[in-house]
Amino acid sequence: MSYKFLKIVIVGLLIGLSSCQDKENRGDSETEIFPAEEKKDELREEDRPMPRSYLLAKMRENDELSTFTEELKRTGLEEEFEGEEGIYTIFAPSNAAYDRIPAKEMKEGDTLEAGEGQKDLLRYYMVEGELTLGALREEIRTSDGGRYEFETALGEKLWAVEEGDDIVLIDVLGNKAKILTSQLEEYYGAYHIIDNVLVPGENNDAEVQE
């Protein structure tokens, strides 16, 4: 075997090895980038809890809403609410809002543990769909008279208006509740903490304290 022939063979082997290495590197790169992204999306979708379950879980972590979330559990509405998928917005009274209700009324309300009346009161704070602060402001500013009307999960109406920099909810009896803080859980809905207890009109005769 001549030296020239041997040199050609060696150069050919080196080129072949280099080509194989390039293909292997490209293969590794594609595996790590594209399929990995697809798998990430797939896992996120599969592992994602039902929107309403997740939203309630996040609300339970908020110390300002312990009274409201306990009411959801006590009346059985929490279990019912978690039973189906769906994006919701919840306007939840703060603990301080509940503290302003006279003790006599709270004691009478304790007898409604599993009653539909108490569940209806809680459903009045729930709205299908995602209503962020930005969405509420936009709806208010494009509504006639700056008064946005929407329907709750109870089937009764609430209104939202702007008072200065605040967004204020008004129930069917004219009671007002200001939105104090808001939390958007992307893909899961939103909840707002309000500073007063609202009532669904004829379904509840209790006088709301301001």
Image (cartoon, rainbow, N blue to C red):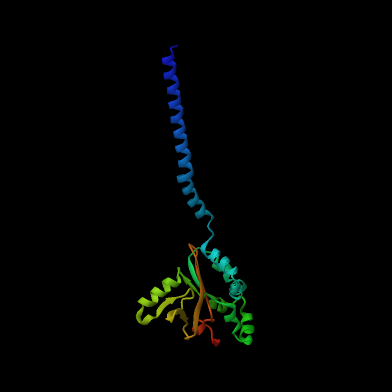
**Which residue is more in the foreground, 103 or 124?**
103
Quadrant for the C terminus, please. bottom right
The residue at the point 48 percent across, 39 percent down is 28
**Residue 118, picture quadrant:** bottom right
Side (left or right) of 66 relative to 52 = right
Q: Is residue 32 visible?
A: yes
The residue at the point 48 percent across, 63 percent down is 186
Side (left or right) of 75 relative to 16 = right
Side (left or right) of 149 relative to 94 = left
Residue 65 is situated, as x and y percent measured from the top left of the image, at: 58, 74
* On screen, residue 36 above or below 128: above
* On screen, residue 137 above or below 187: below
The residue at the point 54 percent across, 66 percent down is 55
Residue 187 is situated, as x and y percent measured from the top left of the image, at: 48, 62
Residue 109 is situated, as x and y percent measured from the top left of the image, at: 61, 82
Quadrant for the N terminus, please. top left
Q: Is residue 124 visible?
A: no
Residue 141 is situated, as x and y percent measured from the top left of the image, at: 37, 77
Outermost front residue = 3
Outermost top residue = 1
